[in-house]
């Protein structure tokens, strides 16, 4: 049954994105010293037409298997930017962390796409953070492109974080 469900999700994942079946939840990020909310991690959820609400492990594996990481990543990023823009006065005071696959980050157009989406919604770069997923390793030219892209985003004021790494400093060599 699990394999059948996985195949079904893989067959419909494009349609789920195109039909805007995903919604966002915001997990608060709290400053340990002040105990105040300083931002949120953006979590995507799928309300599948045929399967109901699915956990991320169900649809993220389908996104990866079908090879649409880039489409999915930009879709979720834009959805978040649009939400922030609905109440910029309140929401731009926080930092929103969005996950991106390494394959998306290593695209030559990554910086341009991210900045143009943020600019489309007239957002300050300082309210955004890119979180690098611990997915497939990137090597060679793609690795260098990823490092260059992250450096450029950092220069523009977008924070760079690593997904689920506690107390681990990442040097450029480890990217």
Image (cartoon, rainbow, N blue to C red):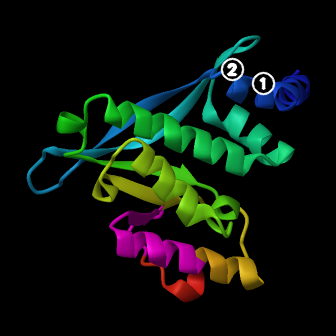
Is residue 125 or residue 27 the one in the foreground?
125
Q: Residues within 10 Å of mark 1 (few under 14, many from 20)?
A: some
Q: Quadrant of residue 173?
A: bottom right
Q: Is residue 1 above or below residue 93?
A: above
Q: In which quarter of the image is residue 138?
A: bottom right
Question: Element type at marker 2?
Answer: loop
Q: Is residue 123 above or below residue 101?
A: above
Percent position of residue 61, x then y = 75, 42
Residue that badge 1 annotates? 15
In-image side of 136 versus 113 (left or right) = right
Is residue 143 or residue 164 the one in the foreground?
143
Q: Can residue 173 be seen?
A: yes
Given the current orientation, which residue lies at the most extreme left position? Answer: 34
Q: How many labels does the image show?
A: 2
Percent position of residue 47, x then y = 62, 18
Residues under labels 1 and 2: Cα distance? 6 Å
Residue that badge 2 annotates? 19
| Label 1–label 2 contact, CB within 8 A | yes
Residue found at x 70% / y 44%: 71
Which quadrant does the C terminus fall into?
A: bottom right
Which quadrant does the N terminus fall into?
A: top right
Residue found at x 63% / y 23%: 20
Is residue 160 one of those drawn in magenta? yes
Residue found at x 71% / y 49%: 69
Q: Can residue 163 be seen?
A: no
Q: Is residue 139 above or below residue 8?
A: below
Disc ID at residue 49: none
Is residue 52 one of those drawn in magenta? no
The residue range painted magenta reads: 147-168
């Amino acid at each position: 049954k699990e394999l059948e469900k996985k195949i079904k999700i893989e067959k419909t994942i494009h349609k789920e994105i195109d039909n805007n079946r995903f919604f966002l939840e915001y997990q608060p990020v709290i400053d340990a010293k002040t105990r105040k909310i300083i931002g949120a991690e953006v979590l995507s959820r799928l309300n599948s037409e045929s399967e109901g609400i699915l956990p991320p492990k169900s649809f993220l594996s389908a996104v990866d298997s079908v090879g649409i990481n880039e489409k999915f990543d930009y879709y979720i990023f834009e959805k978040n930017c649009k939400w922030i823009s609905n109440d910029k006065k309140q929401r731009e005071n926080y930092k929103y962390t969005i996950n991106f696959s390494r394959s998306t980050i290593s695209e030559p157009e990554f910086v341009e796409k991210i900045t143009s989406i943020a600019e489309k919604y007239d957002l300050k770069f300082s309210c955004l953070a890119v979180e690098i997923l611990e997915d497939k390793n990137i090597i060679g030219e793609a690795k260098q492109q990823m490092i260059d892209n992250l450096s450029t985003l950092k220069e523009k004021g977008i924070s760079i974080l690593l997904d689920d790494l506690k107390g681990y400093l990442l040097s450029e060599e480890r990217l």
